[in-house]
Amino acid sequence: MKIKLLISYNGSNFEGSQVQSHTSNTIMGQLYNSFERLGIKTKLHASGRTDAGVHAFKQVMHCEIPLFWEDLVKLKEHLQFQLPDSIQLRQLSVVNKDFHARYSAKRRAYRYILSSQESNPFESAFITFVKHELDLSLLQEAIKLFEGEHDFSFFMKSGSTTASHTRHIYKTQVYNYKGKTILYFEANGFLRSQIRLMVAFLLKVSSYQLSIEQLKEQLNNYKKYNTKPAPPNGLYLSNIIY
């Protein structure tokens, strides 16, 4: 029986979402431990990976489980009991055999949360605090340049093995919410660290360290002006659209 898992997590204390050989302190590593304690051996497939320190509202995974676990409410309770409080199983549901958490996804949406207020220890793991006032109109002008289909070779982490660096960004937004500035990105997919590299460039435009023209040059793969990504703590996987 194939099931879909809808998961939220606070990624602050995890080394990313994917399984890693040197540690089980990842989101999937914790989920595998939970399944194994129930005697379920399975293979988890995620909609995509998130880096260390990145959070998720609606991460999606799928796996196959024995038919005798048909009571998914009970299974969810048993799995959640084994998981740390920083990982929440929001929903388990049966899906058809053709469903794939990654390949069936049409769009992925992320939000990045910023604040120009004074940093505080209660929010520092969840918000990126910047030391300058954010120029909202300049941010809105700059973020729109990312929309459409582009080769994002200059906005990806080095060492990536992805065959194609072309992605289509369908929608971007900049807006204020409860005193915070939110950057929104929705695309058919993202390269490793792509969003954090885009955010880092936007922040440099907002602080007048880099210009709109320089952003266009990097986006068109003429010249790299910034290679350092924004911190992971402000980034959230918001939704997977099927």
Image (cartoon, helix red, strand yellow):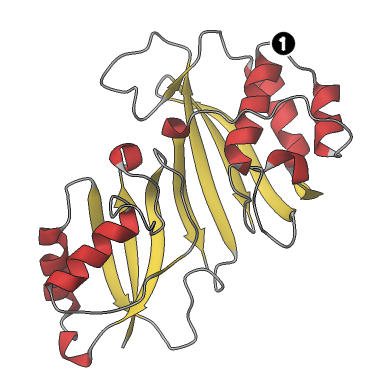
Left or right: 227 with respect to 235? right
Query: Given the image, on which type of amino acid does mark 1 rest?
Result: Tyr
Q: In the rendered view, would you say 200 is above or below 129?
A: below
Quarter of the image for residue 61 reads bottom left
Q: Residue at x 59, y 48 (%)?
A: 192
Q: Position of residue 151 (x, y in %)?
A: 80, 49
* Quarter of the image where the N terminus is located: bottom left
Q: In the rendered view, would you say 114 is above or below 149?
A: above
In the rendered image, the residue lying farthest to the right is 222
Q: In the rendered view, would you say 96 is above or below 214?
A: below
User: Exactly how many numbered labels are in the figure?
Assistant: 1
Crowd around label 1: few <14 · some 14–19 · many ≥20 (10 Å):
few
Q: Position of residue 141 (x, y in %)?
A: 74, 27
Left or right: 119 with respect to 165? left
Res. 230 visible in picture: yes
Q: Residue at x 26, y 66 (%)?
A: 32
Q: Residue at x 45, y 31 (%)?
A: 234
Q: In the rendered view, would you say 230 is above or below 161?
A: above
Using the image as rendered, state which of residue 175 and residue 154 is in the foreground. 154
